[in-house]
Amino acid sequence: MSRPLDAPPLPLLIFAKAPVPGQVKTRLIPALGAEGACALYQHLLVRTLEQTRDWPGLRYLYCAPDTHHTLFAELAQQHNLQLRNQAPGDLGQRMNQALSDHSQGALLIGSDCPVLTTAHVLLAADALHDHDCVILPSEDGGYVLIGQRQPHPAPFRDMSWSHTQVLADTRQRLQEANLSLWLGPTLWDLDDPEDLARWR
């Protein structure tokens, strides 16, 4: 069943961690130090919010470990965000629960992709009119966006994360569940020290 073309804009869910040195962007600590990696994480999060500011639907900031960090309150006020706690569990369980909160469909992103814009998210949202699931792949074998027309646990079930086969494993699970998939343009994440030169 296709999503009605006149349906309201889908919610955009943005995953964020409390900016605590030593707990965010840990793979960048050898190059930047714990404080520097944390500062870059905050910068990327704010950039993501700026670059999706014109999203026509509601935006939710899903926070880990909870919504209590002062930065989250500031960002919610500045960017008109709804704050939510991330569920416990691994990344897949947390993404599955966040998408399950929105029975009419939603799109989910992180803050690791400095080139992601509203235009990319709109492409994905349009594709959900005719597909069960949409993904914007990342160059490292994962993805920077996933969206679902209706919540379904298949792409997150029994997954391992942070390796080069994440997208391939996700596609296999969707195929086994007979869910249609649209793949958008491939973007890049800022995760490792070798990504810093490209960012600069």
Image (spheres, rainbow, N blue to C red):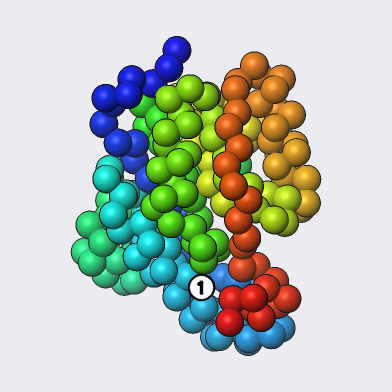
Q: Quadrant of residue 104?
A: top left
At 42% across and 36% down in the image, what residue appears? 125
> Where is residue 152 shown, x and y percent of the image?
53, 25
> Where is residue 10 shown, x and y percent of the image?
34, 36
Position above or below: 90 against 127: below
Secondary structure under the numbered disc 1 in the rendered image: helix
Q: Quadrant of the N terminus?
A: top left
At 72% across and 44% down in the image, what residue appears? 166
Q: Quadrant of the C terminus?
A: bottom right
Position above or below: 152 against 62: above
Task: From the viewer's side, name the closer residue of 98 and 55.
Answer: 55
Q: Residue furthest top?
A: 1
> Where is residue 27 shown, x and y percent of the image?
69, 72
Q: Which residue is label 1 attached to? A: 41
Q: Determine whether, in the image, residue 156 is placed left or right of residue 46.
A: right
Q: Is residue 89 visible?
A: no
At 63% across and 87% down in the image, what residue appears? 33
Badge 1 density bin: few <14, some 14–19, many ≥20, Cα 10 Å: many
At 76% across and 53% down in the image, what residue appears? 163
Q: Is residue 102 visible?
A: yes
Task: From the viewer's side, name the closer residue of 22 and 186.
Answer: 186
